[in-house]
Amino acid sequence: MTTGLSPEDTVTATAALGTLIRGHRLRIGLTQQELADLSTISVRAIRDLEKGKAQRPRADTIRLIADGLRLGPRARTALEDAVRRGHGHRGGVGPGDLAAERPAPPVPLHPLIERAAETTVLTEELRSGTERLITVVGLSGVGKTRLALEAAARLHDAGFPVLWHTAPGAVADCLPACDGRLAALTADCAAFLHGDGQADDLAPDLAGVLGDRPVLLVLDGVDTALLDFHRLSRLLRELPGLRLLVTADEPWNVPGERLFLLSPLEAPDPSDGIRPDAPAARFFLSRLRHVRPDIVPDERVLADIAWVSHRLDGHPLALAAAASWLTVCDLTTLRGIVESDPAPLLDHLADGRSGSRLRERVARTLAALPDGHRRLIGALCAANEDAFVLEDVVRLTDMPLPHCGRMVRDLLVSGVIRSGTDGGRSAFRVLGVVRALAADTTAGTAAA
């Protein structure tokens, strides 16, 4: 009688069974000897099963072990399925499926402009396992998803299976990955981290599928306040190869989290000289070519692009929305509108939903700030200064330096300001997209 599996597949399936048994045993705090006493199976047999040395375990043996582990119906079924896969019945998802399918991340719709340094750091930290939980934060539309896509693609090229989950309502500027047998597994991982399902069943099931191999799980556009840190801790403990990459508007603020702040693209002040190679200018020029390929990027055009990019602080979605207006106006007119009141240009003409979402999400970010932070933003906007330093915050708030330092950090993490230099000193700037929308949000607070 043949099993229907190659010797290599049989070994892989048996190893998955061993990982499941070991995961359940460790979960309830049993030693191998204690499990042997409870199940009446010898310690040696349990050791061989956990090491993947038992090629064709008997059904009675697995039943006794399940009894000793006090497994519920779902976990018991998963254990029996692992045995059947080892005997040649290929139902469900097994560890061999990750090697065979190696699921890929979604395909981005637009090329990545710059971000080489950010991508390299993010990819290396996840690849090496130096960081196993990274949360990319920044203002909506700054490019968090695009950066995550690039890092995930590089890790996939390096051999990592990538399980990608996009939260409901999140902006998905990409072509979704093909559905496959692992799509349900990805959904189960996301649901598990959101507190759904039975913790005692799913974690060992995942261990049986993922094993010790390196795997990247991406949760894109999630609300970190809804994630369950205790469940994540369990996954990281029981799945030593798991890396989790999260993109969110706010950090999770949990132990072991590597906070990765993504700022807008570099957009230097054109007063210091026009730099057509600046990242923000290159990004805007790429979008301009899609809308108006007839425009020749001569010196005057490059100067207008530099000013628009600077006034919008290199914010990618704001730049894309502004570029869409070139279908109905010329570049000089566009520059004039941006310099006077950029708020109307934040609605993308080709996709009004994106522009509206940008307005709503920036307004939501501002509304979520503490009252003192919103008052500071209002004061900075009213001062109409291009840049401010920490001493300005102390002066405007009349608060101690440590408190002001924490306020500035909070504003940086929320993405409403960006850092830079001013005469060699650390300086900061309220983003143009925030200035354009801050008046309504801060007016009520100021009046109160």
Image: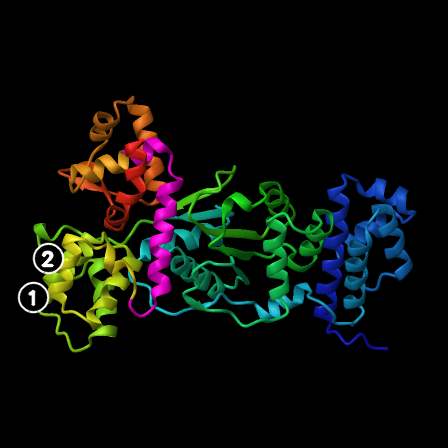
> Which residue is found at the position 51% from the left and 67% from the top?
104
Kindly indicate whether the residue at mark 1 contacts the one at mark 2 (C-beta within 8 angstroms): yes
Q: How far from the left and from the top, in percent, is residue 443?
A: 28, 39
Magenta span: 349-375
What amino acid type is highlighted by mark number 2? Answer: Ile
Say above or below: 132 vs 107: above
> Sequence order check: which comes first, mark 2 or mark 1?
2
Q: How far from the left and from the top, in percent, is residue 200?
A: 73, 47
What amino acid type is highlighted by mark number 1? Answer: Glu
> Which residue lies under the disc numbered 1?
299
Q: Is mark 2 on a helix, strand or loop?
A: loop
Q: Residues within 10 Å of mark 2 (few under 14, many from 20)?
A: some
The N terminus is located in which quarter?
bottom right
> Which residue is found at the position 45% from the left and 43% from the top?
251
- Dominant SS of magenta comes to helix
Q: How far from the left and from the top, in percent, is residue 101?
A: 59, 70
Q: Is residue 260 left or right of residue 385?
A: right
* Residue 274: numbered disc: 2
* Res. 391 in view: yes
* Res. 141 in view: no
Say above or below: 444 vs 289: above
Judge whether residue 368 is colored magenta.
Answer: yes
Q: How far from the left and from the top, in percent, is residue 207?
A: 68, 54
- Residue 385 location, quadrant: top left
Q: How many labels does the image show?
A: 2
Instruction: Between residue 128 and residue 342, name the one nearer to us.
Output: 342
